[in-house]
Amino acid sequence: MHDKDLTPQEFEQLANKFTKFIRKYFEELPEKPPLAQVEPGFVKKQIGEAFPEKGGNLNTVFDELEKIILPATTHWNHPRFMAYFNSTSTAPGILGEYLAAALNTNEMLWKTAPSSTELEETVLNWFRQMLGISDKFFPILYDTASVSSLHALAAAREFHFPGKVREEGIRALPPVAIYISEEAHSSIEKAVITLGLGLNSIRKIKTNENFSMKPDELHKAILQDEANGITPLAVVATVGTTSTTAIDPVRELAKIIEEKKIWLHVDAAYAGSAAVVPKVQAIITDAWETADSIVVNPHKWLFTPIDFSVLFVKHREILKSAFSIVPEYLKTNENNEVINYMDYGIQLGRRFRSLKFWLTLKYFGREGLAEVIRRHLRLAKKFELFIKNSDEFELLAPVNFSVVVFRAVLRSIEKSRLNEFNKQLLEEINRSGKIYLSHTVVKGKYALRLAISGVRTFEEDVEIAKNVIIKAYKQLQENKNLTK
Ligand SMILES: *Cc1c(COP(=O)(O)O)cnc(C)c1O
């Protein structure tokens, strides 16, 4: 039994063992399957239902980590994890997490965490400048893009109806509408559910052949709502959609609503990070200055351990008036000269999240981060070329960033069975244990998605991916011929 924490000296000894474990994990990572090859229940069964009554020596935990936890881990850090938007951590970020837990500050108020508050303010403003966003925007840190967008839409609601929902609740509002493209992320719908606005207030605007929102369709929808006495509350433009990385035309959308009082939120959770590359910045951030809020996730494509999402808000005071409540026991003398982050969101307690990003930026610098992203963009172009030049595969969406959306084609089977074939192909590929891809459906077509956004992903990994995909295709094709 232990009724005291480890001594600092014991801490160091144990920490060294964990460090060794992590070293081995990273050394062996490329040989492990990126997708966990276990059945549901694998971990629960082995860890057991009985809680530790007596406590004990943590030296025994390495065996369980090795035999139970690692095999049941889908390795997002793996060089050939190419599913979803691969997000990877690096040493500086890992060490930042370690420090944050050690210091264990609670950033409710400046006073309860001066270092955390001011470091957060500083590194987020560094990041703002790296992306080319002006100081009209106030950056704030949340855990995920889902939560950032929730806060943005809460601010939009406050912007239209100051104090209304705060005081009287959602029933005091007239009907409202929120416009997103049919390719927008589900987190916007979740935010609308949470804010009590109802999914019926969502307008899914049609997209063009490149999967980006059609401005004239948006215009029509807004006019129709206005004619029906419905208040257009917000437009959400996505820069880098989750399915195909499509880019909504922010400039044109902004033009449509420039004379109107409508909040413009830009969801650039994934693609926003690529704005650290000077040549790409203009494409990504075009007309962002017209937006009211923007979300970018460094935990997605800037090699910072999850979770780390930045919301840039042009109207800091509106966000504050949506959330701020200061009870007597949290009033402090400095309230007017400092940021008390508890005023800008749902959470009171906030952890020292900025440490990991600070160390990441100090180690890589903007230049280093940009170089990794340039490599990803190059590798994606190369894989795109492979798909374009092959008879067995076809491209299903433009390659705007580092994701290639494609599918297998097969002359010997009817078109209607291609979806089934591609589904099986994906399973075959992932069964290889060499790479991990995910899927999407574009205009009714089942598609494979190969995403290159991991910091450990290099040319040889994309070559391996190609070979695995070709091999799986051939195997499946042979099986099809046999069963005919
Ligand atoms: C991944 C993603 C999100 C959600 O991100 P979380 O941080 O997991 O909430 C939202 N929008 C877009 C465009 C995304 O790609």
Image: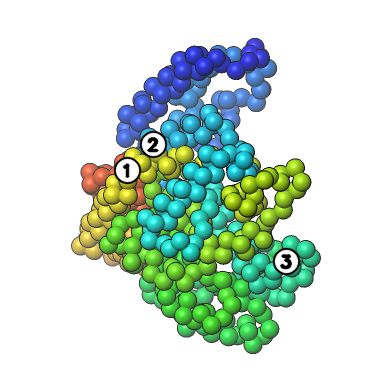
Contact flag, marks 3 and 2 (Cβ < 8 Å): no
Q: Residue 274 at what x, y percent from top left? A: 35, 57
Tag 3 secondary structure: loop
Mark 1 residue crowding within 10 angstroms, few (<14) / some (14–19) / many (20+): some
Q: Identity of the amino acid at label 1?
A: Phe
The residue pinned by badge 2 equals 92
Q: How far separated are the C-alphas under marks 3 and 2?
A: 42 Å
Residue 37 — which label?
A: none
- The residue at the point 32 percent across, 33 percent down is 31
Q: Is residue 41 above or below residue 173?
A: above
Q: Find residue 441 and report its image quarter.
A: bottom left
Tag in front: 3 or 2: 3
> Upstream in the sequence, badge 3 or badge 2?
2
Q: Quadrant of the N terminus?
A: top right
Contact flag, marks 1 and 2 (Cβ < 8 Å): yes
Residue 163 — which label?
A: 3
